[in-house]
Image: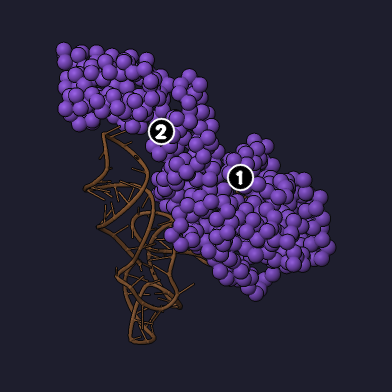
Amino acid sequence: MPIMRTRFAPSPTGYLHIGGARTALYSWLHARKHGGRFVLRIEDTDRERSTTESVNAILEGMTWLGLEYDEGPFYQTDRFARYNEVIQQLMDKGLAYHCYCTREELDTMREEAMKRKEKPRYDARCRRRNEAREGVEPVIRFKNPTDGVVVVEDLIKDKVAFQNTELDDLIIARSDGTPTYNLTVVVDDWDMGITHVIRGDDHLNNTPRQINLLKALGAELPVYAHVPMILGEDGKRLSKRHGAVSVMQYREEGYLPEALLNYLVRLGWSSGDQEIFSLDEMIELFDVGDVNGAASTFNPEKLLWLNQQYIMAAEPEKIAHHLGIHLGKLGIDPCDGPDIMDVVMAQKERAQTLVEMAQISEFIYRDFDEFDETAAKKHLRPVAQEPLEKMREALAAVEDWQPEVLHQVVKDVSDALVVKMGKVAQPLRVAVVGRAASPGIDVTLHLVGKDACLRRIDKALAFIRQRAAN
RNA sequence: GCUCCCUUCGUCUAGUGGUUAGGACACUGGCCUCUCACGCCGGUAACAGGGGUUCGAAUCCCCUAGGGAGCGCCA
């Protein structure tokens, strides 16, 4: 019984995107669940478009998500000798041949087929050509079987049958001698002992060709699982115009990798009514055969909700670490303020992302420029003047600036004025925060600190007087 | 055009011949409450259409429609 191996094989022509991350996750989970090994392979045979920046971006994305690989990364560009060896074997066995057709010929062939309302296919005319053609560097084509049917046994799509007559003789080596995609994947999956090929279903149509090649080489077939695409909200394939598609962008925007992973695993798969899965639960419960065969639409709101769930459940220390980083990006040094753990405890149920948490915590660290207009209109009116004056007076006398004490002060002032606490707390909140929303008023006052509170109340009182004067 | 894949609330999904078609996000009514958020209780909302098979179909079969992918000397 050979060891199970899955692989993720991106081509380094961009960052790690959401769709790739999901297939990588599924492959990773499959390997982890069955005690197998997860292989990373970089498909960089397209030298024009492949870049080392992309390789780094992909590795960075995998690392951030925690999808560690057991073998690799292997680079296809390191394996050209091996591909050439296999191509030569195919030639020697008469399973491949030189094709001297020019690109122009191929183009007209395609056009004419389309005109005849047929699928464009190479007509294999060079199979019978014996002599070279002057001035044409040949490509090498694989002799695809001309009859019979190839059945792909797919874990997700079930049995999918293709007639060999629908396929044509694919190019396995370009005229410059370099191997092409279908050849390299086949050789690599074979050499690397890949037992389960989990990839996007845009590859489903390539699979019968790859199976024919595998058979010609006498290789054992892997099990396939073609996972459906991820669509944007307009039903089109997910792309930049739908917002963030790069995995690393989610880190920038304040998402936790576990939340993204959780979202991705539930996109196209489920286990009962469960929505939140730890990594261990995913490994235990995930089965690639249970993945839905239909494409699914990426829903940013649900990801936001999950992220908030993870923020609430996370170790506060961990959130504090991240919050510090995002505050830094706002130009705030978290040391210039209260214990950051207190900030986390006050805000962790109030933010869907870490970026948002930093934004709604800004008032703790620095004075705001102006009051939120609707909040000021509603709460900084002449009726608020007396409560604010009383609060300022009471707060100025507080020695021990702790939430419990502050709560009592607000309550005492409300009682003294014979009004509900909201009549005092809301103007006070707007005065101190600049907006109508914040943590509990006691915690808010505590976090802002005595000096800043008094200063901001004065500013609010001035604002009310000025408004009344106009 | 041809080949292949897909089709349950707006979205992610449960459902494998007999269910008041379940859950989650979003939306929404209420409760909690100093605001916001969290949390709790409730609501709106779906089997693409048409034919079969069957006592009975979201579930099985066929057709139609719609969506997607592939048809490169890209991967």
Quadrant position of the C terminus of chain A in the picture:
top left
Q: Residues within 10 Å of mark 2 (few under 14, many from 20)?
A: some
Q: Position of residue B28 (x, y in %)?
A: 25, 47
Q: Which residue is mark 1?
A: A66
Query: Are marks 1 and 2 in one subunit?
Result: yes
Q: Which residue is mark 2?
A: A346
Q: Nearer the viewer, residue A383 or A116?
A: A383
> Callout 2: helix, strand or loop?
helix
Image point (46%, 57%), residue name: A274
Give the Cα distance between marks 1 and 2.
Answer: 29 Å
Say left or right for A108 vs A90: left
Say left or right for A362 vs A213: left
Circle 1: residue type: Gly
Image point (51%, 50%), residue name: A262
**Badge 1: chain ID:** A
Q: Is residue A454 visible?
A: yes
Chain A shown in which color? purple
Q: Is residue A128 visible?
A: no
Nearer-N-terminus badge (1/2): 1
Q: Nearer the viewer, residue A199 or A462?
A: A462
Q: Nearer the viewer, residue A48 or A249?
A: A249
Q: How is the image coloured?
A: by chain
* Quadrant in the rendering for residue A285: bottom right
Q: Position of residue A144 (x, y in %)?
A: 69, 66
> Callout 1: helix, strand or loop?
loop
Circle 2: residue type: Ala
**Badge 2: chain ID:** A
Quadrant position of the N terminus of chain A in the picture:
bottom right
Q: Nearer the viewer, mark 1 or mark 2?
A: 2
Label the brown chain with its letter.
B
